[in-house]
Image (tube, grey):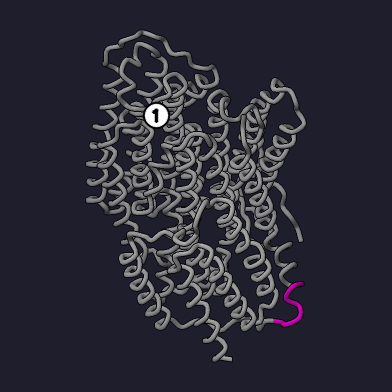
Amino acid sequence: MIIIFYLFSFLLLAFALGTVLSKNLVHSALLMIGSFFAVAGLYILLQAEFLAMVQILVYVGAIAVLVVFGVMLTRKGSVKDSNLPNRYKKVGALSAVIFFALLVRSIINTSFPAPSSPVVGANTIIQIAQTLLTQYAVAFEALGVLLLVAIIGAIIIGKETK
Amino acid sequence: MILSWPTIILEISSLGIGLLLLILGLVFTSLKSKATLGYFSIIALLLMLVGSFYLPSGATQTFINNFYVQDSLALFFKQLFIVSALLVNTMALRYMKPHTNNRGDFFALTFFALTGMMMMASAAEFITLYIGLELMTFTFVLLTAYKKHDLKSGEAGLKYILLSAVSSGVLLYGFSLLYGLTGALDFSSLVALFAPTSSPLLVWAIVMVLAGLGFKIALVPFHMWTPDVYEGAPTPITAFLAVGSKAAGFVAFIRVFFQVFAVYSPIFMPLLIALTVLTLLIGNLIALAQTHLKRLLAYSSIAHAGYILLGVIAYSKLGLSAILFYLLLYMFANIGAFAAVAALVINTGQDKISDLAGLWKSSPFTSVVLLVSLLSLAGIPPTAGFIGKFYLFTELVSRGYLWLAFVAVGMSLVAIYYYLVVIRTFLSGSVAEKTSMTIPFSLKLVMLVSVVMTIGIGVFPGPFTDYLLKVAQAFLG
């Protein structure tokens, strides 16, 4: 179990690094799909099968494809050097490493409480649905409005005006 | 399960009116009938405002499971949001005409933003709070980029969405750390679960929540988006951002830091004091160098976030009521100033400070509005700004932060200088061509309301402060 966890974590980090460092935007998008799959694997290890499924359906199936479509529709010419280098690469890397080191130090020095209730295997979807439509009803409905706003926005910004 | 509908009736009506405006925009075919949509939105907001005074405001009510509460604090902020939306929509009636093609979507979007803000005022759970925040932010991004043929507007929208995505990431990381440490996300459980001793990771969580909410209220060093977005957005939306979005950030800030993290105030207070001093210094000093009125007001809004945070540092009932009072007067002063900018932009298409020269001749009314608004922002009697600063600073001194009050007063003097430079420009200045400005009636109405309220609150602050002290007492128990 622990070996599989480390395997998925390693894959996730490797894919994520590749996404950031690759010069070709399409390669970055493909590597990002790999990292989404690795995250889904971690969810399965945590017995959150539904979440893993949604992760693959939504992130791989929709978001990654959307990124590739975005690249296809906006870029003219070669995609070879489409992921532009950043002037702040070194500063960014340094601050990320410092931040990571500090966080790791804090995580090691913190004792986490044990999970209160063990996760139930087969009923997760029912439980998620019940939670979303009772306790989180307000947030759930508002998310629907959020999506509506996004659609309206896409039309406003995308539509050609005379 | 008992659902208490009065808790959420304002959100539902705001949402319903927004959807209705969208549908009406499709149903109405002639341009003339579409032009009525803006007036419809204003009437609806007026009805909501009147209705909100009939809502039960005494005891705290919850909608479901303590996740959504309506107390007097939430109600005050909702009324503040409705008033700001009302003034902004009135301002936009004429201003946005060239950009909306008479469609109803602009006014519908302001209602969706209003719904998001109201959710932030009532949310007593981090996920609900986050969704409200994102609903507000998303809508604001769209409204910012609404003038899509204007490069600055598009750039501002892009900057806003990228930077707010980063800040949301930080905020969510903070929430997830809180959940990992306690297993709860609703405020009442968190308060019960928090032990006085803290773990290092909890400090990180607090810092991340501070950074995420600090972005919304334009706290230095999370303020970088403010000048560009304020400059690029259509002027009524800039006013809405400066007033509504900031107040929504503050209500979340108040709930989280006065209520949820109350046990840990010794931990976050030094950080908050440092950031507040930084905000006061940078906001006011960089404002000195501005040549555009909207950018100047953006830096002044950053500086005002600093003043308002002084009330959080005081960390008392009086401090909280001073924050609420300041937000109220800040709304009217800022709307007045932005309405004057809107009048200028409609007539000249410019918002440079040097363009103000001769305004006294071409439009005395706009000059008076701008004068009163800027004096209120500078904190000069008899405007409300003086009373607001007075309450904040005296409470700060009585809590033992004398040095901080000195810093704030010093920075207020700097602020008076840059406001006076603007005032001098439009009071003096020779007019080359004496063209009188034409100001639409709706804009005049907004200016009139803001001036009357700014002076009214300044001369008779009693009823307001009494009421707000009651609100603060009810919230802090």
Q: Quadrant of the N terminus of chain B?
A: bottom right
Which residue is farthest front?
Answer: A77
Q: Residue at x 69, y 53 (%)?
A: A144
Residue B176 rendering spot, x and y as whole percentages? 52, 69
* Closest to the observer, B448 or B404: B448
Q: Is residue B385 above or below residue B280?
A: above
Residue range (magenta): A120-126
Q: How many marks?
A: 1
Q: Residue at x 40, y 70 (%)?
A: B203
Residue B82 rendering spot, x and y as whole percentages? 58, 37
Q: Which residue carries the number 1 mark?
A: B458
Q: Residue at x 48, y 77 (%)?
A: A13
Please say whether residue B466 is visible from this viewpoint.
Answer: no
- Residue B473 in the magenta stretch? The answer is no
Q: Quadrant of residue B92?
A: top right
Question: Hey, what amino acid is under mark 1?
Answer: Gly
* Secondary structure beneath label 1: helix
* Closest to the observer, B392 or B14: B14
Please say whether residue B297 is visible from this viewpoint.
Answer: yes
Instruction: Please state if B283 lies on the left or on the right of B43 as rendered.
Output: left
Instruction: Please state if B373 lies on the left or on the right of B160 as rendered.
Output: left
Which class describes the residues within 10 Å of circle 1: few (<14), some (14-19), or many (20+)? many
Residue B420 rendering spot, x and y as whole percentages? 26, 27
Which residue is farthest top?
Answer: B434
Instruction: Please state if B61 lies on the left or on the right of A129 as rendered.
Output: left
* Closest to the observer, A110 or B408: A110
Q: Is residue A53 above or below residue B71?
A: below
Residue A153 rendering spot, x and y as whole percentages? 61, 44
Q: Chain of mark 1?
A: B
